[in-house]
Amino acid sequence: MKSTNILIMFSLITAISVFPSCNNDPPGEQRPQAIRDTISEYRQQIAHLNREISRMERQLTDMGERVPARAATKIRVEKIQTRDFDHFFTINGSVEAVLDATISPEINGQMETVSVSRGDRVSAGQVVARLSTSVIESNIEEVRTSLEMAETVYERQKRLWEQGIGSEMQYLEARNRYRSLQKSLATLESQLGLANLRAPFSGIVDDIFVKEGELAMPGSPVMHVINLDNLYINTDVSERYLPMVNADDSVILRFPVYPDYEYYVPIHRLGNVINPDNRSFRLQLRISNPGQMLKPNMVATLGIRTFSVEDAIVIPSVLIRQDVQGYYVFVAYENADGNYYVEQNYIERGPESEGKTIIESGLDPGDLLVTEGHNRVGQGDLVQLADQ
């Protein structure tokens, strides 16, 4: 009889507690934050009632009364083991292509032809544009004509000089003019070759700045060519981290636009000079880019290790909850009947990094940490392990 009265009493309490509270706003006009607050309040009430029910069920059991079985909440647990813990700090970086060039002419001239378009792939040494060479070709033809005459005069003066006829000055003047014209011809032919603009490496034509018919000058950009097969990741690290970063370390590389991209990458280079403007030093990674999914100037995030701890109790930070007494997690225990229930274990938190937290006290190796379902249970609740 006593058991029946208690159960009836709790049925009434439960019905009253979970009945929606009055709200002046019509249901369709409630604000999202008000709805969220109400849901949070209801969850707290449910957790409180579950704890009270569990406590009173244990009292009934101690009195020798039979308690109707309740459906146990299904959870997943993980046996706590010690592991190594690495602490990282996160810093942003940017992407840079290892091979990136702006093509400019070495001589003045009018752009005669542009033989590629934006987005075209080019090979190293391929001609991508050509300057007008009509003036140079005309000069070459004139010099060749003069060179033929100078060669004839030189050969004749040389034979006469060898026969002891004529003056040495005539021979030397003919030789010097012949050699001078040879050099002039070589210079003009070299300039003719400079009229062809070639790709410095294999890559993609990213942009073209000069149109056919426009004037191009040395130093003025004509075309941008880039190779995306290999990239640098550059970042500036505060000098206060200098003692913690070593050239042989690896960092965690991520990209916000690709949530699944996460790799440990060795440091390629550390700067040897502190930038006086922001008191930082340069850290650089070098990576391959299969599929060319990464682009220059993309934002990257780098997780840089600052210290390591061996044989620590480390748990996911998301499992840690807080109340007025402090931080706690749920741990599953087996009772005398072979059933499982959960308890709040209050803990002392240590350093946190990459979503993991060191637990200084409150947990021991071998404890069954609740990893799934921890938001649906309360102190003393009966539970069922998902793998049982």
Image: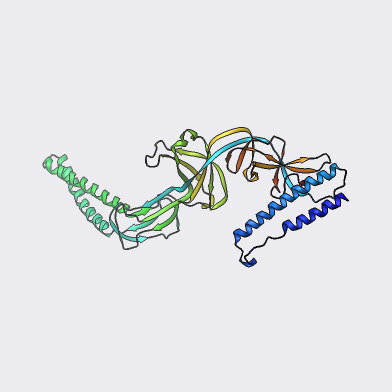
User: Residue 279 sits in which quadrant?
Assistant: top left
User: Residue 130 sits in which quadrant?
Assistant: bottom left
Q: Where does residue 249 sit, x and y in percent of width and height?
A: 52, 36
Direction from residue 272 to residue 146 in the image, left or right: left
Instruction: Give the residue at the far left of this rendering.
Output: 167
Q: Is residue 74 visible?
A: no
Q: Where does residue 345 sit, x and y in percent of width and height?
A: 69, 39
Q: Where does residue 332 sit, x and y in percent of width and height?
A: 74, 42
Indicate how the structure is coloured in the image.
Answer: rainbow
Q: How many marks?
A: 0
Which residue appears at 21% of the width and 49% of the height? Answer: 181
Q: From the viewer's side, name the closer residue of 163 and 16.
A: 16
Q: Is residue 220 visible?
A: yes
Which residue appears at 76% of the width and 55% of the height? Answer: 14
Q: From the viewer's side, name the closer residue of 92 and 101.
A: 92
Q: Is residue 140 above or below residue 77?
A: below
Q: Where does residue 220 sit, x and y in percent of width and height?
A: 32, 54
Q: From the viewer's side, name the closer residue of 353 and 128.
A: 353
**Which quarter of the image is occupied by the C terminus?**
top right
Q: From the viewer's side, name the closer residue of 219 and 11.
A: 11
Direction from residue 88 to residue 370 in the image, left or right: right
